[in-house]
Image (spheres, coloured by chain):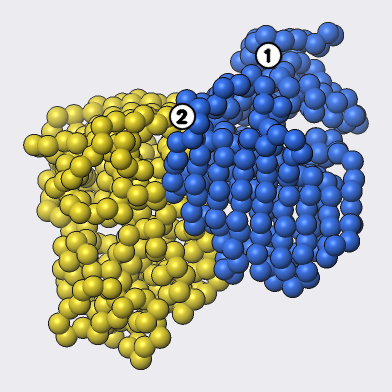
Chain colours: A yellow, B blue
Amino acid sequence: MTPISLGLVGLGTIARNQHLPALAATPALSLAAIASRNARLDDIAAFYDVAALLASDVRVDAVSLCTPPQGRFAQAQAALRAGKHVMLEKPPGASVSEVQALAQLARDRGVTLFATWHSREAAAVEQARTLLANATIQRVDIAWKEDVRHWHPGQEWIWEAGGLGVFDPAINALSILTRILPDPVHPTGAILEVPANKQAPIAAQMSMVTGAGAPVEAVFDWRQTGPQTWDIRVQSDLGEVVLQEGGARLVVAGVAQINASDAEYKRLYARFVDLIARGQSDVDLAPLQLVADAFLLGERRVVEAFVE
Amino acid sequence: MTPISLGLVGLGTIARNQHLPALAATPALSLAAIASRNARLDDIAAFYDVAALLASDVRVDAVSLCTPPQGRFAQAQAALRAGKHVMLEKPPGASVSEVQALAQLARDRGVTLFATWHSREAAAVEQARTLLANATIQRVDIAWKEDVRHWHPGQEWIWEAGGLGVFDPAINALSILTRILPDPVHPTGAILEVPANKQAPIAAQMSMVTGAGAPVEAVFDWRQTGPQTWDIRVQSDLGEVVLQEGGARLVVAGVAQINASDAEYKRLYARFVDLIARGQSDVDLAPLQLVADAFLLGERRVVEAFVE
């Protein structure tokens, strides 16, 4: 079968560390072009931006966007209008309504739009989902604590309006939460801790509740040095179900079930290929909706200025 | 026909000024009970809250909620679970996801949920919508400026987290905008001016764009004394279409079309009766989504403390 010809837009950390290796391991996709303002790869056609790529004679069937979310709408819109299938890094956009508009555009043009949530592809997430499908959830606690200096060095856009701050990693937890619980959740309150010199929060506490009334308490913090924590603990009638290491490790009632190696982006690209073959889109906005709602109803507290 | 028996929850300014007169003018609805912590009406059964009403032997078929949005989810959930039709004042909740959960619950229970946008019932809105249905929109400007001291005296909840601040009136403009434009809009940027002693903004500028690319610029301000401004100006291939006075007055290419008296809440209750008769719900979250997105991507600026 002829591989799907793909253009990669954005060539930053996430592209180099995740997208390029995953693409190299996906024979159904062929990397045909890069669009980046300040970087290029040997032997791959290079363009300044997606508009230049689309206007060129390098033919791509699909575009994968891993630029910062603030500018992604215009890029995705241009690609969809040109009839290309589009895959979006997380978060899928700077607002929920812009991604709803992209989903409508993809439907109108008959192409695939895939809003990815890479953490949902962590090894143990689907088993946790299956396990909890018929469980009675009593309580959920999320602790997502990491060192922003280690994970996001020099990424100024993440602190700006629309950059999400600590919700950039927190949305990974929320993407797992909304995948594994049998019931939708909604926030009832939030505290956003915003450094005096930034627009976006460096830490947050978020209280949510399931439709059935079980509390979901989340703590997100970007100031954690030393060991990093990415845990979701679910109390249920099956006992305690714990996802650790961002979904890679599953422990049920104290017994480890899965501790698998990372294949998140390979699975994302496999799913993109599958969606294109089926003529479908996958645009689940629940994680971004929870973040928007936390900003809407959250109380802001000014905390110590952050200096990288 | 036997009237639908209705319980009114909340007996503040909006209930007294709008809901009670509209109910009195709607023979298809019969006011059977009031739930309010600190107020009552002569000759109407009175309860402390919606739970007490639902637990009583006063039978209601429907409940209309006009309490502040922060506590409305639990009230609506209790009423829907009890099999009552529910009408929500604007904004329909403190978050988008909680109203999505209510809409799902209403579907599951087979009852009507009506998230109202009273400004959409202003006299000229439907004519503007019809007029613009096939127009090419070039640009939209919204100016929504009023005196918070006059319109919201003593309403502390409106300044708290989840209270929306100036977006409480601004969402009226956004509800009209999303009704009259043929195309969805999404925000591209926002500036939220927040008093140093408050959580919610006292003023905001919001830049949006239609799917077709036309700019929509909005200015919301709660500091306007003297004449009040509630205008939406649409530049189109039909000329300038202007909605004034919150949608009561329509001027097309300089010629006044409609300047009608207010019947917003009468029309809302008539529509609620109609939805119940048809077994339908009406939950359009676009206006609240735009506000949540403005909070998500907006830049915050601290301005002078507000003292009522």
Badge 2: few (under 14), some or many (20 or more) residues near its Cα, within 10 Å? some
Are the residues under marks 2 and 1 on the same chain?
yes
Q: Which residue is mark 2?
A: B196
* Residue shown at 84% from the left, 50% from the top: B249
Q: Residue furthest bottom?
A: A57
Q: Is residue A141 above or below residue A199?
A: above
Q: CA distance from mark 2 to mark 1?
A: 32 Å
The secondary structure type at the circle numbered 1 is loop
Q: Chain of mark 2?
A: B
Quick check: B199 left or right of B16? left
What amino acid type is highlighted by mark number 2? Answer: Ala
Q: Is residue B92 above or below residue B133?
A: above
Q: Is residue A301 above or below residue B286?
A: above
- The numbered disc on residue B36 is 1
- Residue A157: image quadrant is bottom left
The secondary structure type at the circle numbered 2 is loop
Q: Quadrant of the N terminus of chain A?
A: bottom left
Q: Quadrant of the C terminus of chain A?
A: top left
* Residue shown at 65% from the left, 64% from the top: B139
